[in-house]
Amino acid sequence: MQKKTFETVKLTPTERADLLVAAAQKFKARKEELAETIAREVGKVINDARGEVDRGIQTFLAAAEEGKRITGHTVPVEGQSGNENRMAFTIRQPVGVVAAITPFNFPFNLTAHKLAPALAAGNTIVLKPAEKTPLSAIKMVEILREVGFPAGYLNVVNGYGHEAGQHLLKHPDVNMYTFTGSPDIGRLIKSETGIRKVTLELGSNAPNIVHKDVENLSEIAQSCVQKGVIHNGQACISVQRVYVQEEVLDAFLEEAKNAAESLVVGDPMKDETQVGPMIDKKSAERIESWVNEAVEQGATVVSGGKREGSIYYPTVLTDVKPEMKVVCDEVFAPVIVVVPYKDFNDAIKQANDSRYGLQVGVFTSNIHLAMEAAKTLQFGGVIINDVSTFRADVMPYGGIKDSGVGKEGPKYAIEEMTDEKIIVLNNR
């Protein structure tokens, strides 16, 4: 159905933009309903869920604007001998049918980051939301239909990845896949989609470097802890590895301990709660076993380290080793590890020592060190004087290595979701 709709039902860029803006207005009007749906599905605390809806609204508005200025560029073919009578330029056209496979952790905004640019570019969509969080995505699609997107422009396929997702991978009518999830599934998608376009956002174990020259160590420690446990730690760019210059290590750990123990843990529907349950009990049990294993191997629990049902308390660890799961794998839980370093180059080396490369945070007051970090850190994004968790929804977002291929952010996703075609005019 999506292929037929793409071929027969055309909306102009202005029409598409107007519909996306209308959807954003509906999201705003139904913000509390949508936020409660997110909180109940994911266990995300209600204030974070409200923030996610706000971000989704901004993503739709940005996509609406970018969809009206999709451009190509001129190509100076006449600059080569024999082409003096020719003129060339490129245009960008929608790829066709986009299969979007979304994760549970941001069921509204990460779905927005796939649907809004795809629609803005003129594509049709088949959406498979995470099986644990289908309702947030379904509500988004219902609103998109309410505002006037034609039948067949977007459909939802629910089910497990190994069933519904596998069917989408095999379907010949899909022209592009956009996926957020684990590296293992990303490899499977890339191996089975052949020469079709793929955008993959595959997670991280985000490092952050805190140098001794910072002036606001207390604030930085608090930020590292808070952004390590925000969304219950279930975010690809959550602070996980924190490399602290050894001269300020003790002070950092004390501030981090205070910050972790001051967080309010409990019912995600209460306004005062800052950390709620993880997506399920199995996930909480997994991180509990990882932390226990690290402690058995010599790690020290500075704060936290306990579980109650699906809740895992904000946890700070130190005395860790590079081979521990809590260091080298993606914890995807409210756990950060603090590692000392001697000199800045050592910190960069340790940060780069990972199969992941999504985003990294660097704190220093030395512009020379900041520039060195920007050039040598092997990540899709280097955030100077803020944590790795920072993301503005309009910026290019995507990693290298096992963190994926391609970029999100409305402008950049639209480029991924369109094909460039060259037009050559010959003045005979």
Image: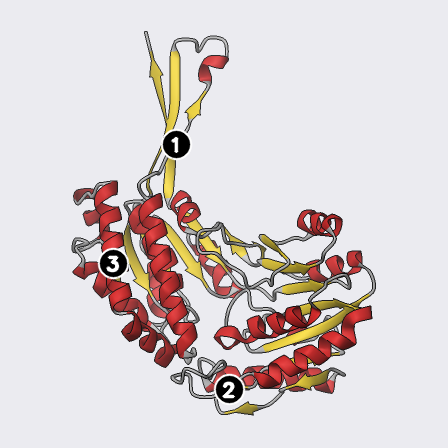
Mark 1 vs mark 2, CA separation in Å: 50 Å
- Along the polypeptide, which appears first: circle 1 or circle 3? 3
Determine which of the numbered discs, if any, sits on residue 23 in the image: 3
The answer to whether marks 2 and 3 mark residues whose Cβ atoms lie closer than 8 Å is no
Q: Amino acid at mark 2?
A: Val
Q: Nearer the viewer, residue 119 or 97?
A: 119
Which quarter of the rendered picture does the N terminus lie within? bottom left
Quickly name the residue at label 1: 72
Across and down, in percent, residue 155 comes to 24, 60
Q: Nearer the viewer, residue 347 or 49?
A: 49
Quickly name the residue at label 2: 265
Q: Amino acid at mark 3?
A: Ala
Farthest-out residue, bottom: 308
Q: Nearer the viewer, residue 397 or 49?
A: 49
Q: Residues within 10 Å of mark 3 (few under 14, many from 20)?
A: many
Can residue 65 be seen in the rendering of this structure? Answer: yes
Across and down, in percent, residue 398 comes to 52, 54
Q: What element does badge 3 sit on?
A: helix
